[in-house]
Image (spheres, rainbow, N blue to C red):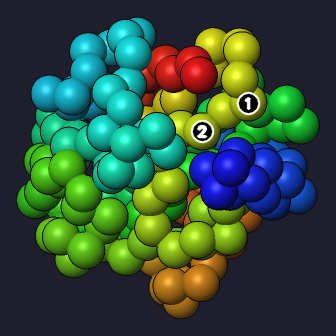
């Protein structure tokens, strides 16, 4: 019963806190370099393990990515679910990861490699994994951005704040898509 009530509360707060999907824009006059994003937890287009969802430990999966341009000053990560019932739902935002970093271990929550996590649409700082309503298959986009700047935001910043701070600063980007269904 407690799990059912908790799930209902999470779903209700999730509906109230959704964000609009916005793609951060590149540095003017440039085309972002492609970055390949991978995880040992799941391959591109495959199911995300329960460990990384609300059905398990709700731990962020490990992520790795290919190199970014030499002029990169920081790396940002955005994880979102565009299949959410009331619009795109943000599960994790991280910024100011050191530009030499090529991976975050599982459960990293951005505390590794100089990164800082912001507030997701569950109104929680850090990672909150997939937890869709029962029934439909959802797609989760793990996006990595190489930026030509560091981001001056406080830890309670939200997705719109990060999108605004990244506007016009994207040098490289890539994504890994995983799926989950209750």
Q: Secondary structure at mark 1?
A: loop
Q: Hey, which residue is sitting farthest bottom in the picture?
A: 154
**x and y, in percent, of residue 99 in the image:** 19, 61
**x and y, in percent, of residue 39 in the image:** 21, 30
* Label 2 Cα crowd, 10 Å radius (few <14 / some 14-19 / many 20+): many
Q: Residue at x 63, y 13 (%)?
A: 137
Say if residue 173 shows up in the picture. Answer: no
Q: Residue at x 46, y 38 (%)?
A: 55
Which quadrant of the view contains residue 135? top right
Which residue is disc 1 drawn over?
133
Give the numbered dot on residue 131. 2
In the depicted structure, whether residue 96 falls above or below residue 39:
below
**x and y, in percent, of residue 33 in the image:** 33, 32
Along the viewing direction, whichever of 80 and 13 lies nearer the viewer? 13
Q: Residue at x 26, y 15 (%)?
A: 43
Say if residue 93 shows up in the picture. Answer: yes
């Amino acid at each position: 019963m407690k799990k059912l009530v908790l799930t209902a509360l999470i779903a209700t707060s999730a509906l109230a806190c959704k964000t609009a999907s916005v793609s951060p824009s590149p540095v003017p006059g440039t085309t972002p370099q492609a970055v390949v994003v991978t995880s040992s937890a799941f391959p591109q287009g495959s199911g995300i393990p329960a460990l990384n969802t609300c059905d398990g430990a709700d731990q962020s999966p490990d992520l790795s990515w290919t190199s970014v341009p030499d002029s990169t000053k920081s790396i940002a990560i955005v994880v979102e679910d565009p299949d959410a019932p009331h619009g795109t739902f943000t599960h994790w935002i991280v910024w100011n990861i050191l530009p030499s970093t090529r991976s975050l271990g599982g459960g990293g929550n951005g505390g590794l490699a100089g990164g800082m996590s912001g507030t997701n649409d569950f109104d929680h700082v850090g990672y909150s994994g997939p937890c869709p309503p029962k029934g439909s298959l959802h797609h989760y986009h793990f996006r990595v951005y190489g930026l030509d700047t560091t981001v001056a935001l406080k830890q309670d910043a939200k997705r719109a704040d990060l999108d605004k701070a990244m506007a016009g600063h994207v040098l490289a980007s890539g994504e890994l898509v995983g799926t989950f269904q209750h």
